[in-house]
Amino acid sequence: MANKVFIATSLDGYIADKNNKIDWLHQLPNPTGDDLGFDAFFEGIDALLMGRNTFEMVLSFDVEWPYSKPVFVLSSTLTHIPKGYEGKVFFVNGELQNILKNLTELGYHNLYIDGGKTIQSFLKEDLVDEMILTRLPVLLGGGYPLFGDLPEPLGFKLLASKMYLDTVVQNHYVRDR
């Protein structure tokens, strides 16, 4: 099983601004619509595992559901799948290790871990195997950081580094265990 993160941050490590907005992600000129490697990444995963806040944010975008693979939402409070998302979205809760075991038994071996709190929880339990971090050239000066406190340092190896749009740097790391 591989738990993978694909996320963009500001230069100062934030994934959302002080108002929990991500508008700044779309302010970078991208005339060709470059996906910054997301489609290739997405092809290599079986399902998504995201937190409730991220799920609710995606729902708020008022766009067609962007995921063609099953989405498992970590939540101890949500109980009803929104109309139109049945068979696409599934709620899970409990210990992360147990959730991962259950998903593996269901045939999901490569998971896209998404959402700040969810990523932080996975890192705290040393459950992240790969991270693709895309740094946009903007300083937010505050907001919601990607990383939080860890019980101990986690080492990663750099697999690749790419530049997109002449301004964005993307680093692909694997856990060094």
Image (spheres, rainbow, N blue to C red):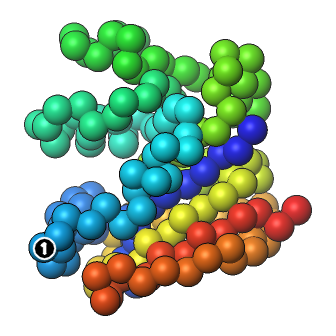
Quarter holding the N terminus? top right
Residue 66, located in which quarter of the rendered image? top left
How far from the left and from the top, in percent, is residue 111?
59, 39
Give the left or right position of residue 8, taking residue 140 as reference.
Answer: right
In the depicted structure, whether residue 92 falls above or below residue 68: above
In the depicted structure, whether residue 40 falls above or below residue 61: below
| Residue 95 visible at all | no
Amino acid under disc 1: Pro
In the depicted structure, whether residue 128 falls above or below residue 22: above
Give the left or right position of residue 29, taking residue 67 as reference.
Answer: left
For mark 1, give the secondary structure: loop
| Residue 56 visible at all | yes
The residue sitting at 13% across, 73% down in the picture is 31
Would you name the residue on which mark 1 appears? 31
How far from the left and from the top, in percent, is residue 9?
40, 71
Q: As rendered, which of 23 and 120 lies closer to the eye?
A: 23
How far from the left and from the top, in percent, is residue 77?
43, 21
Q: As rendered, which of 112 and 114 lies closer to the eye?
A: 112
Quarter holding the C terminus? bottom right
Give the left or right position of residue 108, taking residue 136 as reference.
Answer: right
